[in-house]
Amino acid sequence: MVSTLRKLGRWGIGGFERLGRGHIFLFHTLMGVPSVLARFGLLVQQMLSVGVLSLLIIAVSGLFVGMVLGLQGYNTLVDFGAEQSLGVVVALSLVRELGPVVASLLFAGRAGSALTAEIGLMKSTEQLSGMEMMAVDPIKRVIAPRFLAGFISLPILATIFTAVGVIGGYFVGVGLLGVDDGAFWSQMQAKVDFSEDIMNGVIKSIVFGFVVTWIAVFEGYDCVPTSEGVSRATTRTVVHSALAILSLDFVLTALMFGNI
Amino acid sequence: MHNSKTVEIIVGLFVALGLAALFMLAMKVSNLSTFSDEGGYIVTARFENIGGLKVRSPVTVAGVRVGRISNIGFDNITYEAVVSMNISGEYNTLPTDTSASIFTAGLLGEQYVALEPGGSEKHLKQGGELRLTQSAIVLEQVIGQFLYSQAEGGGKGGDAK
């Protein structure tokens, strides 16, 4: 009985300790951001591996998500004779929800796990301690550029995802199913508001970019420096990122569109 | 793996692609290109019943969209709805005796305000008010009136026999 209670207590203390470490780590990382801007080459190098190399999976997924939305939306709308509104359905669902959320989930799987594994391996092969020995701050040299690169890349990727998705929906709706070309775009333009819909979607992706990259670099930096520890940290990155994205999405949606 | 110049060019392309996507969303998907609030003027109208009218619903003249609803308020004294419309600056020759009606696009479509220009020589300006208004047609009321008149007509027919 007492030992169970003690286990629970240890678990709780451990959890809060990690949470605290995460925030102190975030603070240090943010303090390191100005020095990254001074060494721009580091950031560009990370933007390539985190952002550009994720572009293919994001663009292809966006295309297929948009095409599926076009097909499903058409099947439902045609029953009401409202297939002209297909553009609105595709654009609003992509801009408000699917663009930021699905792009962030893919980003967590593609780039977040890679960041964790890379930093975790650096830690377990003692490259990070080596840097400290040479009076190089690993947070400024390794963590901050990766954090900033992820934070900048995700909104860009989410925007590309949304744009490609709308084009995918257009291909299926207008090209395949014969929705009127003009009605598709004009109804979309009439119903989608720039500041209310598109900018809110961009804000969502900025928040997700911050959280996902934070989780990814922290899990790598905080991992147990063994091969098992790195593998666990990578798994945790994907799981925690997905949970954070979906729960934050609900909160943000309630704040933006919920009229609360 | 790459030299830094190539990396910079590729990342530059990536950022440019992101901006292009945002530009496409702004211009092609959203209403930014078709209608802007800037340079417009606000006129108000009072309705007894606005039905399902919402903020951002369209305002049309002869079926052409000239503005949108910017605000919907309620007058505590006259118990009427006060609807503010933001009309685009290029349509500045609407006469002061223009009348406003609330119509429905299609049977179940969204509701919008249709303006019917009158014959006055003076033009509407910022803060003007439309005095001639026609409320939204509430389907339940129409059906109710129809059934009532049917029943009345049926009763009279019975009397005549």
Image (cartoon, rainbow, N blue to C red):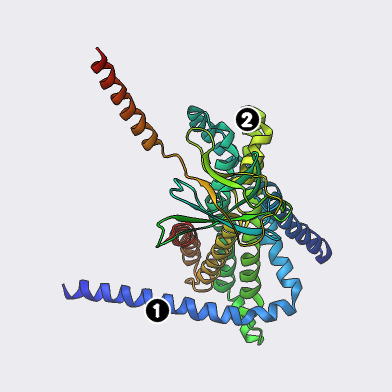
Residue A76, x across and y down, in percent: 48, 32
Which is nearer the N-term, disc 2 or disc 1? 1
Q: Residues within 10 Å of mark 2 (few under 14, many from 20)?
A: some
The chain holding disc 2 is A
Q: As rendered, which of A202 and A5 lies closer to the eye?
A: A202
User: What residue is shown with label 2?
Assistant: A179
Q: What residue do we see at 40% from left, 57% from top?
A: B79
Which residue sits at x=69%, y=77%?
A: A36
- The residue positioned 47% from the left and 71% from the top of the image is A224
Q: Secondary structure at mark 1?
A: helix
C-alpha gap between disc 2 and disc 1: 56 Å
Residue B49: horizontal and vertical position, in percent? 43, 48
Question: Count the marks: how many?
Answer: 2
Residue type of the residue flagged with mark 1: Glu
Say which of marks 2 and 1 sits in front: 2
Is A246 drawn above or below residue A166 in the view shown?
Answer: below
Q: Position of residue B126 (x, y in %)?
A: 65, 61
Front position in the image: A256 or A38: A256
Quadrant where the C terminus of chain A is found in the figure: bottom left
Residue ranking furthest to the right: B5
Dot 1: few (<14), some (14–19), or many (≥20) neighbours within 10 Å?
Answer: few
Residue to which mark 1 is pinned: A17
User: Tag 2, which secondary structure?
Assistant: loop
- Whether residue B113 can be seen here: yes
| Residue A110 coordinates in the image, percent (x, y) | 58, 55
